Image (cartoon, rainbow, N blue to C red):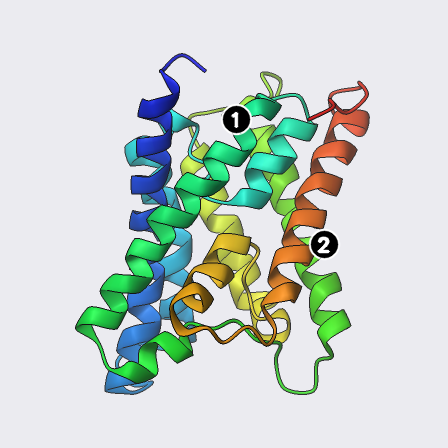
């Protein structure tokens, strides 16, 4: 970590705001103007490309996590200082909450409720949790490879696009069933505003467990070492 912690936290908060602002805006437009204005693929693009742009803009300062599960997974894999995990979580929550607040100020009251994450029709809470855990674990392993492994093709150069592409793909294929969070801050920030706590536990427990598991598996299988102690 080359930059002072304060600079990194500011970049992490701003990057999370950019990421969530673009993703949340897609949901807001769909809610207030109807599904013809932007379809599910458009919303998925908003989150996926929003993440890619946020990493491109500020990732060189903070590492471009924008996700508590990613910070935890990178720490477990030995690629991020464990002492900085909690400060990063706070910065991510602050940036994401600012994006949720903008949605509340600009759009109708229905939008903040639409930002809630819930399992798809017919999907149990536990099934959604398992899907979120698996997808987030794979996400963290992709990040570790494309952003930190010198042996990987196009290491670093293609990282923003490939990381954003994972989120777009997961939101499109897994999201309709699981709710498509893969990020505790993405689900917790709207709830901090609207206080609808019903299913948020799924999207805190599942992604965090997946991030830790993904970091540990990557450390053993790819890096060939024991996971770090956070």
Q: Is residue 76 left or right of residue 142?
A: right
Q: Quadrant of the N terminus?
A: top left
Q: Residue at x 73, y 31 (%)?
A: 218
Which residue position is annotated with label 1?
Answer: 84
Mark 2 in CB contact with mark 1 (< 8 angstroms): no
In percent of width and height, residue 131 lies at 70, 63
Q: Residue at x 36, y 61 (%)?
A: 23
Along the polypeptide, which appears first: circle 2 or circle 1?
1
Q: Residues within 10 Å of mark 2 (few under 14, many from 20)?
A: some
Q: Residue at x 72, y 75 (%)?
A: 125
Residues 46 and 194: in front is 194
In percent of width and height, residue 208 lies at 65, 48
Residue at mark 2 to residue at mark 1: CA–CA distance: 25 Å
Mark 2: which secondary structure?
helix
Q: Residues within 10 Å of mark 1 (few under 14, many from 20)?
A: some
> Is 130 located above or below residue 65 in the figure?
below
Q: Is residue 123 left or right of residue 193?
A: right
Mark 1: which secondary structure?
helix
Q: Which mark is residue 11?
A: none
**Residue 189 figure quarter:** bottom left
Can residue 80 be seen here? The reply is no
Q: Residue at x 66, y 60 (%)?
A: 132
């Amino acid at each position: 970590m080359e930059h002072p912690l304060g600079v990194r936290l500011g970049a992490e908060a701003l990057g999370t705001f950019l990421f969530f602002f673009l993703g949340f805006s897609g949901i807001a437009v769909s809610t207030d103007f109807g599904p013809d204005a932007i379809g599910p693929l458009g919303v998925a693009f908003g989150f996926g490309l929003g993440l890619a742009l946020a990493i491109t803009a500020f990732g060189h300062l903070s590492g471009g996590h924008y996700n508590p599960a990613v910070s935890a997974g990178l720490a477990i894999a030995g690629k991020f200082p464990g002492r900085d995990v909690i400060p990063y979580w706070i910065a991510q929550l602050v940036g994401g909450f600012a994006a949720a607040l903008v949605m509340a100020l600009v759009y109708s009251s229905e939008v903040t409720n639409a930002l809630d994450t819930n399992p798809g029709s017919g999907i149990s809470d536990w099934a959604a949790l398992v899907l979120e855990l698996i997808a987030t674990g794979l996400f963290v392993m992709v990040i570790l490879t494309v952003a930190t492994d010198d042996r990987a093709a196009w290491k670093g150069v293609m990282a923003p696009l490939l990381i954003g592409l994972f989120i777009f793909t997961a939101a499109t294929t897994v999201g309709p069933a699981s709710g498509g969070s893969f990020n505790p801050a993405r689900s917790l920030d709207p709830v901090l505003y609207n206080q609808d706590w019903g299913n948020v536990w799924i999207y805190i427990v599942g992604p965090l467990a997946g991030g830790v598991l993904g970091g540990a598996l990557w450390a053993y299988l790819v890096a060939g070492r024991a996971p770090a102690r956070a």
